[in-house]
Amino acid sequence: MEVFMVERSLKGIPMDQLAAAQQRAIATAKEMTAAGTPIRYIRSTFVPESGQCMCLFESKDEGTVKALNEKAKIPFDNVSVALDLTP
């Protein structure tokens, strides 16, 4: 399993819609895992001023991460392998 960063441009998104998108990501990850495609939502960081949002997922491949975001109907700009440097 690797960590992937999903980059999003969400400038102007209301906080309730951002929270709903996060909940969809979490729920979709649980559904996909239960169906046999392991993926875990780790966390998100949102910068309100620019609208940048970075979400971390743990998965076997980039395609699974893209599929989750498409299934959850959460727009994204890019998916990349990332290193989670949490101490």
Image (spheres, helix red, strand yellow):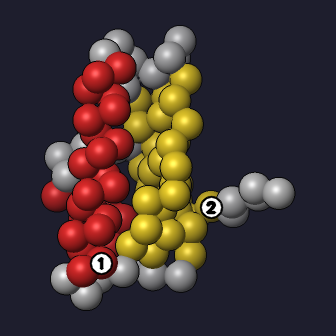
**Horizontal and vertical percent position of residue 58:** 50, 69
Q: Would you place residue 46 above or below residue 41 in this image?
A: above
**Horizontal and vertical percent position of residue 76:** 34, 43
Q: Residue at x 35, y 42 (%)?
A: 22
**In the visual, does 81 lie left or right of 86?**
left
Q: Would you place residue 6 above or below residue 52 in this image?
A: below
Q: Which residue is mark 2?
A: 82
Amino acid beneath label 1: Thr
**Horizontal and vertical percent position of residue 27:** 26, 57
Q: Quadrant of the C terminus?
A: bottom right
Amino acid beneath label 2: Ala
Residue 63 visible? The answer is no
Q: Residue at x 25, y 48 (%)?
A: 24
Nearer-N-terminus badge (1/2) = 1
- Mark 2 residue element: strand
Answer whether labels 1 and 2 touch (C-beta < 8 Å).
Answer: no
Q: Residue at x 39, y 73 (%)?
A: 39
Q: Would you place residue 25 above or below residue 30 in this image?
A: above
Pick whichever, 87 or 62, lies toward us.
87
Q: Which residue is mark 1?
A: 33
- Tell me the tag on residue 20: none
Q: Residue at x 45, y 75 (%)?
A: 59
Distance from disc 1 to disc 2, alpha carbons, whole Å, reads 21 Å
Pick whichever, 62 or 54, lies toward us.
54
Q: Nearer the viewer, mark 1 or mark 2?
A: 1
